[in-house]
C-alpha cells in the first residue's frame, strides 16, 4: 500500500507542478496533497492571509497541518511539491527541479527530485532521484 500511495502522491504532485510551471512561466508556489485513510487523494490549499507567502513558510505550514492529520490518523500519507535548484548527483551541476517531499505515517520521509529544463513551454525531464530526509527537518 505504501508504494501505491507514493506513486499516487508523486503522479498528482508532478502533474500539477508541470502544469503550473508552464502556466506561470517557469515557477510555482508549493502545492500539496494527501491520501486519506480510505486511499483517496486530495489536493490541499493553505492560506494565511498573505497573497505572496515565502515558499519556506508555505512548506512549513503544510507540514504542520499534515503532521497533525497523521497524528489524528485522518490521513495516511502526504506530499508537498515545490520548485528548487539542486546539485545533480550524476553530473554535479546545479539544475532546476521539482522536489516532492513524501511522508507516510510512521516512516522516514523522502525527497524525490525531478530535474527539468523548460524551453518554449515544453518541459524536458532528466533522471530523477530520491533522498531520505532527516526526521528533524
Image: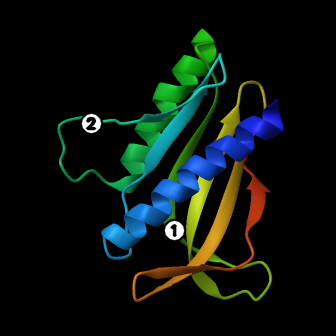
Residue 25's spot in the image, x, y percent? 32, 76
Badge 1 crowding class, 10 Å Cα cut-off, few under 14, some 14 to 19, many 20 or more, is some
- Tell me if I can see residue 98 in this picture: yes
Location of residue 118 with respect to 49 vertically, above or below = below
Q: How many marks?
A: 2
The residue located at (65%, 17%) in the rendering is 38
Q: Quadrant of the N terminus?
A: top right
Residue 109 appears anywhere in the view: no
Q: Position of residue 103 (x, y in %)?
A: 67, 37
Q: Badge 2 is on which residue? A: 47
Q: Residue at x 32, y 54 (%)?
A: 54
- Residue located beneath label 1 in the image: 84
Return the x and y of residue 106 as percentages of the image width and height.
77, 25
Q: Quadrant of residue 49?
A: top left
Disc 1 and disc 2 in contact, CB within 8 angstroms = no
Q: Residues within 10 Å of mark 2 (few under 14, many from 20)?
A: few
Q: Image quadrant of residue 73?
A: top right
Task: Tell me if residue 22 comes above or below residue 33 in the rendering.
Answer: below
Label 1 or label 2, whichever comes before in sequence order: 2
- Residue at the far top in the pictured view: 72
Residue drawn 56% across the image and 48% down it: 12
Amino acid at each position: 500500500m505504501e508504494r501505491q500511495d507514493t506513486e499516487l502522491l508523486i503522479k498528482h504532485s508532478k502533474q500539477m507542478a508541470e502544469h503550473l510551471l508552464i502556466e506561470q512561466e517557469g515557477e510555482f508556489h508549493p502545492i500539496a496533497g494527501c491520501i486519506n485513510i480510505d486511499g483517496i487523494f486530495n489536493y490541499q490549499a493553505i492560506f494565511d492571509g498573505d497573497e505572496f507567502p515565502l515558499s519556506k513558510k508555505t512548506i512549513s505550514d503544510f507540514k504542520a497541518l499534515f503532521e497533525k492529520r497523521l497524528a489524528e490518523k485522518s490521513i495516511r500519507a502526504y506530499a508537498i511539491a515545490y520548485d528548487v535548484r539542486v546539485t545533480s548527483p550524476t553530473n554535479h551541476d546545479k539544475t532546476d527541479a521539482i522536489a516532492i517531499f513524501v511522508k507516510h505515517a510512521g516512516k522516514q520521509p523522502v525527497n524525490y527530485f525531478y530535474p527539468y529544463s523548460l524551453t518554449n513551454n515544453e518541459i524536458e525531464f532528466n533522471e530523477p532521484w530520491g533522498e531520505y530526509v532527516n526526521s528533524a527537518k
